[in-house]
Amino acid sequence: MEKIIKIKSIGHVLFKKSNKAKNINISIESNKSIKVSVPKFLTYKYAEYIVYTKIDWIKKSIEKLSQKIQINRNNISFNKQKAKLFLLKRTYHLAKNNNFSINKILIKNQKTRWGSCSQNNNINLNIQLYRLPKELIDYVILHELVHIYVKNHSKEFWDLLGKFVPNVRAVDKKLKEYVII
């Protein structure tokens, strides 16, 4: 069940009932649309009230999103085969040079993620990485390779990643300047 409610000063908001949600969750999508997950046991009216209490946060989040460099995943302005080959070669190169053992690499046109690492050590990369500066491509690949050893974002993970990426926090911040739409 879902409902669209127009809220003064932020526009249309999609409210969606969820069996899984335990709390009201407000999210701003990369296209700046606002979605609210509402637990089944709460009313839309109450969820709307909560959104009104968070309007300043919502506006700030939308403003931050407006300042990011947008990568439109539907605009493939490059040779997909060339991009896939580059990302595969670069991943194998970084894995070999840093003694990481990968199972397989998949290149996809993902909606929100730059990359991921599965429990089986499969590395998934977004083809849109090809459009980023080389430093950020290497950062994302190394980030996923480190997940082979540390499957979370604990201090241990960041310390290990820092051994492969100098100024890791600054590079991570630079990546956050980009958003996939």
Image: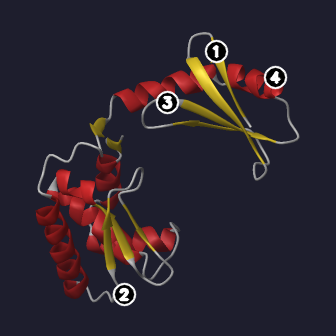
Residue indicated by mark 3:
61
Residue 60 is tagged as: none
Q: Position of residue 133 (x, y in %)?
A: 16, 52
Q: Of label 4 and label 2, which has the lower sequence position?
A: 4
**Given this view, does label 3 or label 1 mark the residue nearer the observer?**
1
> For the residue marked with disc 4, what is the amino acid?
Lys
Tell me how far mark 3 sits from mark 1, CA to CA.
Answer: 16 Å
Q: Residue at x 49, y 30 (%)?
A: 61
For residue 34, what is the image quadrant? Answer: top right
Tell me how far mark 1 sits from mark 4, CA to CA.
Answer: 12 Å
Q: Judge the density around disc 3: few (<14), some (14-19), many (≥20) Cα neighbours within 10 Å.
A: some
Residue farthest to the right, as pictured: 41
> For the residue marked with disc 3, what is the amino acid?
Ser
Rendered-image quadrant of the C terminus: top left
Q: Residue at x 60, y 34 (%)?
A: 35
Rendered-image quadrant of the N terminus: top right
Residue indicated by mark 4:
45
Q: Of label 3 and label 4, which has the lower sequence position?
A: 4
Residue indicated by mark 2:
103
Q: Position of residue 43 (x, y in %)?
A: 85, 30
**Badge 3 element:** helix
For residue 72, what is the image quadrant? Answer: top left
Residue farthest to the front, as pictured: 1
Q: Nearer the viewer, residue 154 or 88?
A: 88
Q: Position of residue 171 (x, y in %)?
A: 28, 54
> For the residue marked with disc 2, what is the amino acid?
Asn
Q: Position of residue 84 (x, y in %)?
A: 19, 67
Q: Judge the density around disc 2: few (<14), some (14-19), many (≥20) Cα neighbours within 10 Å.
A: few
